[in-house]
Image (spheres, helix red, strand yellow):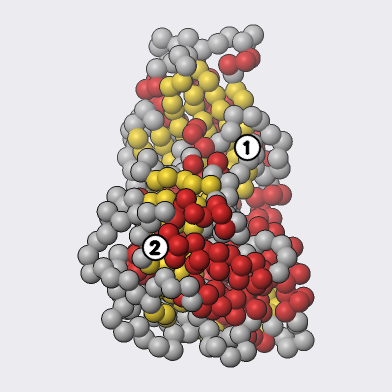
Amino acid sequence: MTLTSERAILLTGATGYVGGRLLERLEASGREVRCLARRPDALTARVGPRTRVIQGDVLDRASLAGALQGVHTACYLVHAMAGGGDFSQLDRRAAVNFADMAAAAGVAQIVYLGGLGHERDLSAHLASRHEVGRLLRSRGVPTAELRASIVIGSGSASFETVRALIEKLPIVLAPRSVDTLSQPIAIADLLDALVGLLDLERPVDAVYEIGGADQVTYAELLREYARQRGLHRRIVSLPMISPRACRAFLGLLIPSHGRVAGEMVDSLRNETIVTKTPAHAPFRTRLLGLSTSVEDALLAEDREFAKVHWSHTLPPQPSSRWGGLRFGRRRVVSWVLRVSLEPDDAFAPIQRIGGSNGWYGMNWFWRLRGSVDRVRGGVGFRRGRRDPFELGAGEALDGWRVEQLESGRLLRLVAEMKLPGRLWLQFEVEPTAGQVLVRQTTVFDPSGLAGLAYWTLLYPIHREVFKRMLQGIHREMQSCPGSRLPGAGEGAVGLEARAQTGAR
């Protein structure tokens, strides 16, 4: 097997979870990629300079001709479950269109991601997945079909369903099929397998089954997620709960994935485990277990979140949304200050925060918060800070710890107080149009319903505390030598509330 970076790849489903992650992997390796999209505008801004986005629809046969011309390998990652109507009929029509046009264009290889499951008594969802694989193979183009179970990764419909159930429900009432075996696979392992098939030296017409190291019930998957999030949850299997009732409930609980999650409920009755070990597979077959897969998914979320610069991410308009903006399971509230100072001068009072310097506003609140934390067995605010002027990454700072420090530019603190969740406080300083933008952002990751209730009910207090903090930092800046801060009458450049809205 050799790398085939010189061969053109057509990727369908790039706006979906697996497709989007696969696109990132292919672009990073320097491959030539074309993406088929019904709405190119939704994808164009996200792709690299070597990737072409072509308008087309697998349900529109004529639109596929140009997209497939000159393609060596076509990766088929689309399905109709998220749409309306009879998804099986739509999937059938789309697969025939794609296979016929791929054969006409001389495509050498199709790579398709399907689902595990025994051939008998399959749910509508899994039966459609298997039928699509058969239809793709039936038109003469060698098709490598990869069959997988639940994908463990932030953004996957199955993983988001697990998250919603555990985060929002103290007791999960589930149908009896929650005790059916599955073989979850980490998204990184799945992507490795797909890339292995895309790199095939010669065309292959075969079905490969793949799964993680552990065969577990769906109930065990729910419990493992709860354990790693520190949540105490009961999973109760009740035979009288019908799949139809589950579908309706999931539609309310997770609207963004409700239809897909609802259709997947019917598939719970089918074991989705590997029964045939792939022979001569072009990918690793010793894959991660459940615990490591969930841990990696949660850590990957934290890593991606840590890279966010709110000055570049949040929209400029203010909002009155209660509790701030939702970013996944997190809640984000941001305040903006614009000043006429050098970035280092604007950052100086930020770097001096805490310890004997105080928190620039409502210090009585922080003393009270520290006392409450000590009563609960936490660190409180007794640790102070090592130096009144200098900070370093990893240092303790009262009830916080310095998670990241970029001098003159960024300070991110993570709370070490006892909370029903995790809390970050981030300051960013950025030159813009002759001024300096100072953004203060609080991020809360609630732990289940208790954490969500804590943040929602105390939001007015948190809002006032952090608003007063930035106002105090503003006053400290005014005492800076060379300060050219606006006077009281120049409110347009003063403190602006930004409890942001919008979508990530």
**Horizontal relation, residue 129 to residue 403: left or right:** right
Q: What residue lies at 64% left-to-right and 8% top-to-bottom?
A: 489
* Residue 434 locus on image (x, y percent): 45, 14
Q: Seen in the image, is 55 located left or right of residue 356?
A: right
x and y, in percent, of residue 167 in the image: 62, 64
Residue neighbourhood size for the residue with mark 1, other residues' Cα within 10 Å, grouped as few (<14), some (14–19), many (≥20): many
Res 500 label: 1
Q: Residue 107 carries which label?
A: 2
Compared to 453, does 141 lie above or below? below
Asked if the residues shown at circle 2 and circle 1 are in contact, with their CB atoms under 8 angstroms apart, the answer is: no
- Distance from Cα at disc 2 to Cα at disc 1: 47 Å
Nearer the observer, 4 or 325: 4
Residue 238 drawn above or below residue 413: below
Q: Quadrant of the C terminus?
A: top right
- Front-most of residues 467 and 100: 100
Q: In this view, does 157 lie to the left or right of 48?
A: right
Residue 453 in the image: x percent, y percent?
Answer: 69, 55
Residue at position x 41%, y 37% in the image: 411
Task: Identify the residue shown where x is 52% and y is 37%.
Answer: 313
What amino acid does circle 2 point to?
Val
- Give, as a three-letter code, the residue at label 1: Gln
Question: Can residue 76 be seen by looking at this rendering?
Answer: yes
Vertical arrangement, residue 467 with respect to residue 176, above or below: above
